[in-house]
Image (tube, coloured by chain):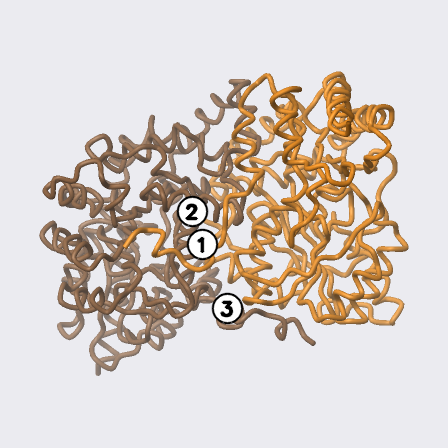
Chain colours: A brown, B orange
Amino acid sequence: MSWSDRFSEVARDIQSSEIRELLKLLADPEILSFAGGIPDPALFPTADFQRIAGDIAADPDRNRDALQYAPTEGYVPLRQWAMDHAGAPVLELSIDNVLVTNGAQQGLTLLAGALIDKDTPIAVAQPTYLGALQVFATHQPKFVTVATDDDGLQLDALETALQSGVRFLYTIPDFQNPGGFSQSEARRTAIVALAHRYGVPILEDTAYRDLYYDAPPPPSLLQLEARLLAAKGGAGEWNKDGLVVQLGTASKTLMPALRIGWVIAPEVLVEKLVVLKQADDLNTSSLNQMLAHDLASQVLDRHVVTLRQTYGERRDVMVETLRRHLPNDAHFSAPKGGMFVWLTLPDGMDAGALLELAVAQEKIAFVPGAAFHANGGGENTLRLSFSTCQPDDIKRGMERLCGLIRKEMK
Amino acid sequence: MSWSDRFSEVARDIQSSEIRELLKLLADPEILSFAGGIPDPALFPTADFQRIAGDIAADPDRNRDALQYAPTEGYVPLRQWAMDHAGAPVLELSIDNVLVTNGAQQGLTLLAGALIDKDTPIAVAQPTYLGALQVFATHQPKFVTVATDDDGLQLDALETALQSGVRFLYTIPDFQNPGGFSQSEARRTAIVALAHRYGVPILEDTAYRDLYYDAPPPPSLLQLEARLLAAKGGAGEWNKDGLVVQLGTASKTLMPALRIGWVIAPEVLVEKLVVLKQADDLNTSSLNQMLAHDLASQVLDRHVVTLRQTYGERRDVMVETLRRHLPNDAHFSAPKGGMFVWLTLPDGMDAGALLELAVAQEKIAFVPGAAFHANGGGENTLRLSFSTCQPDDIKRGMERLCGLIRKEMK
């Protein structure tokens, strides 16, 4: 018997992501890559990080706690910070509503474990974050896709999905990965109302929420739900009636290597997630939690100003260059924040084939969009990231890409 | 519909561990606790840790890599170190046989995901590590328990289990948690031979392997398997014919807060675990991997000498005091390493009830043994840890415990 004969059904089904394989090919430093969805390491707050790490090391009590096993729920001050960041005290949250996770990805892992049985229907946007599709897939759900437009989830498509009895909706309301769109307040309000009408939980992923380049995004779904419950006269009842579960992360605004994320949820769900996390990895590093807390509370507010400035300029250059050079038969979103521009090629043009040409002929790379589609489709779409490239490179890269598309249209 | 109505079958089944609930009760500083299974924080190599953290921070290239997302497989020098630590180059391992995990617990999580379907039979020692039982349980296997004696797994019981078609055996050959026993070389050799006779993989957990207080433990199951394959003339065939998967951790010898563990497995299995880890949490913190690597390669060898000395003295005091005071109708193991002494109370005496008395009357705590039994039983057993208490406290605590047992026997 070989090892592959011993694999579980889930392990046999799961495959390495296309993106992962793709990124391996991009080690060539001559390639100008718009493929990654990662922060620019030149923007990490390294000086603050080192100062804070030194402060923790210099305090014997903190240092000792920092290096030991720790409660699964997480470091109390960080839970408090996450709660405030999400909107407490306007929202009636307590730290019992917050679980610290090993990056937001583990939050998705735990929520998937808590809520998905084999063949459970769950609703996801078309397109949506590949990492969510991957972790959900390990529980073998039935994906129900919800169509999107430049403003995000389409309400009629969403209502159809919710009516069909999905266990939850997973959504990224702010500057979505990969679509770049941000839901308007009106649409957000309607989404929360629909969720309550059909009694369907929403997993709200706020990974890009702080990275806005024009104006702050509308209230979060969690905040809008509080408004809805208050209007019903149900203040203080969120632990019983709340349906919005929020995921947050320090990876986009501080540093991915902290591996710090959090889940905000009604207490009964948090309690279950804690038990699942204990089985999964016991606890998140105390040291990393302390570092994340101190950075978030001391540095984040001013640091995101720099990020907004720098990423905003890059976004502007990408959007401007595409506006100028992209053929009319193609279409792109102009995001108000985040890291991504979503591009739809002319009908019948395959983004996978285009990538091969782009790498070989133009030395540029992007991610073909098909991988972001839970149930297939999207072969003529692609994702461009502007987060790690300098403005001149973005201009040059987009000109080359548009030239290539134009050439392929002939 | 309430949240608990929405829970998956797994989430409904999984419960917070008794130990976890118990430990919450032990916040009282007057309680002398032998319950934890954690290293003594006073022994952490904090000065080395700070020096190494400073060195990484002072190197701009390393520092930048340390804070960014990273390949799922792990930091190459750490994988190299883990491979050497496991016995390469005598064993023909490459770094493609090593995956870095978020503590050894995540290694168990990924292996469980790769190998267990619902109702899959798997073999575990009776008793065994609770955290393994918990993570395996999230995949709803059928536990097949293998009886143990003071030398570990009983071979006839093991053969019966392997014959029954279990998917794998999970075992801790060195200074087992909770049993304290270490398998002899003869028994290890027989275990590996049985695994190969029946074609059953072994997950070998080496968490305590470096913590020996008398003499180094016999070769690992992985090393003995290499010997077996070499005797068959199959050198270099481990990737095809190997059945032993080894789990390691930096938590017991360096610091738990690094959250660094590793899995050593045939390539085809590592490739699958990588995909599962990517879905689970993307990657382990690069910074923590660099810290673990530098500590492991620069500090570990001399640091474990200190640990062996200090923990060894504590072991001696616990064993000596129990030898002197434990009533004859009770029985305990005298471990040659690790952190635990396993105690069997007189027939009919319940360790859970004894704990309540111990806390209330004697201000001491331990872990009742039932939780370490996959299929029930062990009500008259308990686990004592000597890792975090000073010798005088251990002596005083064991005298009180023995007195209480004696009183309860009347």
What chain letter is assigned to the residue under label 3? A
Mark 2 Cα within 10 Å, few/some/many (few <14, many 20+)? many
- Tell me, yes or no, whether the two marked residues, 3 and 1, touch with CB atoms within 8 Å: no
Image position of B55 with respect to A185: above or below: above
What chain letter is assigned to the residue under label 2? A
Q: Secondary structure at mark 1?
A: helix
Q: Which residue is mark 2?
A: A272
Amino acid type at mark 2 = Lys
Mark 2 to mark 1 CA distance (whole Å): 7 Å
Q: Which residue is mark 1?
A: B11
How many discs appear? 3
Mark 3 to mark 1 CA distance (whole Å): 18 Å
Mark 1 Cα within 10 Å, few/some/many (few <14, many 20+)? many
Between discs 2 and 3, the one toward the N terminus: 3
From the image, which quarter does the C terminus of chain A lie in? bottom left
Say which quarter of the image contains residue B103.
Answer: top right
Say which quarter of the image contains residue A335.
Answer: bottom left
What chain letter is assigned to the residue under label 1? B
Image position of B143 with respect to B70: above or below: below
- Tell me, yes or no, whether the two marked residues, 2 and 1, touch with CB atoms within 8 Å: yes
From the image, which quarter does the N terminus of chain A lie in? bottom right
Which numbered tag is attached to residue A10? 3
